Amino acid sequence: MLSRRIFLSGLLASTAPAAWAAAPERSLRPTVRPDDFLRRTVPEAADILEAANLSGRVGFAVADATTGEMLEVENPLYPLPPASVAKTVTSAYAMDRLGPNFRFRTRLVSDGVVADGRLDGDLWLVGSGDPLFDTDALAAMADALVTLGVQEVTGRFMVATGALPEIWQIDPDQLPHVGYNPAISALNLNFNRVHFGWERVGEDYTISMDARSASFRPAVQVARMRVEERSSPVYTYADAQSHDAWTVARGALGEAGSRWLPVRRPAAYTADVLQTLMEEHGVRLGAPEFAAEAPGAALVLAEHVSEPLEDILRGMMRWSTNLTAEVSGLLATQASGQEVTSLEESGAAMTAWMEETLGARNAVFVDHSGLGVDSRIRPQDMTHALVAAGPDGPLRGLMKDVPMRDPNGNVIQSHPVDVVGKTGTLSFVSALTGFARTPSGRDLAFTIFCADLDRRDAIPDAERERPPGARTYNGAAKRLQQALIERWGVVYD
């Protein structure tokens, strides 16, 4: 690990003239003048890799972000899982196809009329896929409907779901109860997660399933929980046709606690919560019925408009929200005129777009979030994509700051190398891509992929949520990534 003193001393220019089109397969050794003490104290990339002692495979590619000149590589043409680094490509794809000012709209509409406190006609809940829509926003729409004077609905309660395909889960290989693997729909609520809470009362438990947000905690019926006498598995899931049927092992609960569980029926979940919110206003809605589209001439009674897509994507890149990535990618594919029914189809469309627009080769996307481990990108292609986007382009503006740390893990304040990027983490997979600005102002584009897929494939089902050794592996990978960036900040400044 390089110390901050190296950066604060005088730094010299490097000589690494390898052209992009002829990227070498192994790390390039920069030419070092005999009197260049600072450079001779910087570890070689091979030494950094050896010290990290990571199992599996490591690939990286760093280039001048302005000229595209390739500076240093390791396994640049070997495709590896990008994990959430895939969201970087998804962001560029969505911005290109939808535009930075695209906004999601969720509406309550009707083909009837409101008179004397009564809506004579059907009430339609219509979504466009807003991934940030929550119970607070839905409650505001219910309030607006009541403010309009609606005290009774004579027609049906209809839910329009045709804006996006309904997808049961992002990655079928994930454990059923992890909240980061929700379903996808035209109507999404609270990131399509339900809040499960429990508290011991005597020898039994009081449990709750609600759609909580900052201001509300409405109970739900489309997701239900039962405590069972067992020690494992902790959770089981079953499709009960009308609702998500969960069970939890009594032996795993303890005194009290909570966690978010994925929702498999997002449109029904949203409708369920709206019924509860309207009933609190004294307005009873009938059982929801589902259709693809609302009537074309429907009157808009209430509407929630999202933030611009650019702001939504910036939040996605910071918090790595999988639902946002999948919705944005699916809509981007639809905007190109292609009808899709699955994430694999839409991922293939994004793959073709990346090849055509950013010059990538041999990329494979099975989704837009990177949750599926079967996605692959070559480090060189990912770095090439950043060069194509430009060191000061909109993609950089979506990335989050990546702090540099000392050997104890503490953030180094005012570090001379400024790094922004996107991280990606799966069990035994760690990825990082982004831009590094050296002390002299030179912009570098880089990608570092680390993966031990054999160890990942060998994880038993019972240990998949917290597999032994995964945390240690990913910590070592992150230290390797920082050591490489610090090397590049000196050698290529």
Image (cartoon, rainbow, N blue to C red):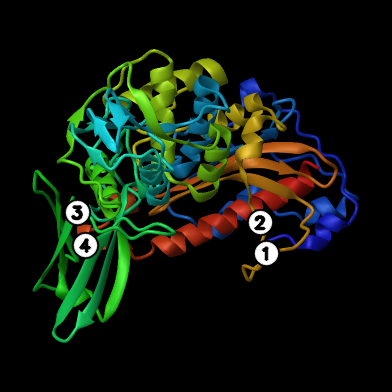
Q: Is residue 212 visible?
A: yes
- Which of marks 4 and 3 precedes in the sequence? 3
> Can you say whether 300 is above or below 417 in the image?
above
Position of residue 132 measured from the top left corner of the image (x, y, whole percent):
44, 43
Q: Which residue is mark 3?
A: 223
For mark 3, give the secondary structure.
strand
For mark 4, give the secondary structure.
helix
Q: Residue type at mark 4?
A: Ala
- Which of marks 3 and 1 precedes in the sequence? 3
Task: Compute the Cα span from label 3 to label 4.
Answer: 24 Å
3 and 4 marks in contact (CB < 8 Å): no
Residue 430 numbered mark, or none: none
4 and 2 marks in contact (CB < 8 Å): no
Task: Compute the Cα span from label 1 to label 3.
Answer: 42 Å
Q: Residue type at mark 2?
A: Pro
Q: Residue furthest front?
A: 116
Q: Residue type at mark 1?
A: Val
**From the viewer's perspective, is the residue at label 3 or at label 4 nearer?**
3
- Which of marks 1 and 2 precedes in the sequence? 2
Position of residue 321 measured from the top left corner of the image (x, y, whole percent):
44, 46
- Which of marks 2 and 4 precedes in the sequence? 2
Residue 462 numbered mark, or none: 4
Q: Is residue 27 visible?
A: no
Position of residue 167 measured from the top left corner of the image (x, y, whole percent):
25, 35
Would you identify the image quadrant in which residue 224 lies? bottom left
Q: Which residue is mark 1?
A: 411
